[in-house]
Each structure stands twice: as structure tokens, then as C-alpha cells.
Image (cartoon, rainbow, N blue to C red):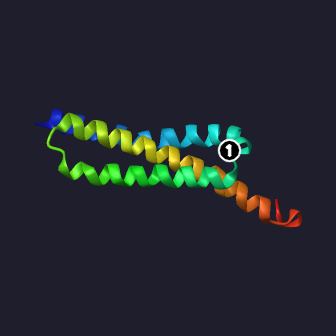
Amino acid sequence: SAASDVYKRQLNHFIYRSNAVTYMIACVFAGMKLHTIGRETAIMVGLILITIQQIGLYELTSFESSNAFLFWSFASQMIGGLGSGINAVASMSMVVSISKSSERE
């Protein structure tokens, strides 16, 4: 039905947006805690979280329950958003730290 299609589209948008929301949250917290854990460690943690996201999304092919599918896709997208946000802050910090002061804007 048309109402069901609208609901599914809204749910899909919600799931995809969860990645962006957790990306923004991770950027803020990673920026505040980066000096504590270090840039290299943060990048490794970010890559591990992105790998977990990819594995989670791959595993969706074996789910038969729609509720489990929605939960796992939502959780995977959130985990990937955290990893991407951490990587964005840590890698930019690393680039800035190795660039010359005169080359920075």
C-alpha cells in the first residue's frame, strides 16, 4: 500500500541519517579527547569501528526477521558513523601536525 511505502522510505532515511548524526557526535567527542588517546590510536579505533559496520551490513543478507534487520542496520550505521567521525578528526589533526606553520591557513 502507499502508506506502507511511505513508512518504509521514512524508516530508510532514519537509518541512513543515524550514520550522519553519530558522525557529528563522534567528531565533537573525538576532538575533546584526542589528546588523551592519541591520533594513531584514534585512527585505529575508527578503522575498527568502520570494519565492524561493514561486517554488520554484510550480515544483513542472512536476516529473515524485518525487526532484526532494521535494528542491525541501524546499529551498524551508528557504529560506522562513530568510526568515520573519529577518523575525520584524528586524520585532520595528523595532517595539520606534520604540515609547516607557513603552509597553514
Q: Which of the two residues, 63 or 74, is positioned nearer the viewer here?
A: 63
Furthest residue to the right?
102
* Residue at 26% from the left image edge and 38% from the top image edge: 70
| Circle 1 Cα neighbour tier, 10 Å, few/some/many (<14 / 14–19 / ≥20) | few
Q: Which of the pair 20/33 is nearer the observer? A: 33
So how many labels did they put on this image?
Answer: 1
Q: Is residue 105 left or right of residue 79?
A: right
Q: Is residue 93 above or below residue 75?
A: below
**What residue would you read off at disc 1?**
37
Q: Residue at x 76, y 59 (%)?
A: 96
* Residue 27 drawn at (x, y percent): 61, 43
- The quadrant holding residue 95 is bottom right
Residue 54, position in %: x, y? 37, 54
Q: Position of residue 12 (x, y in %)?
A: 30, 42
**Which quadrant, please, contains the C terminus?**
bottom right
Residue type at mark 1?
A: Ile
Dot 1 falls on a residue whose secondary structure is helix
Residue 75 lies, in percent from the top left, at 37, 39
For the point 45% across and 48% down, the residue is 80
**Does 44 sit above or below residue 17?**
below
Q: Quadrant of the N terminus?
A: top left
To which quarter of the image does residue 93 belong? Answer: bottom right
Residue 58 in the figure: left or right of residue 62: right
44 lies left or right of 103: left
Looking at the image, is 102 positioned above or below residue 65?
Answer: below
Extreme residue in the left direction: 1
Residue at the image position 43 percent from the left and 55 percent from the top = 51
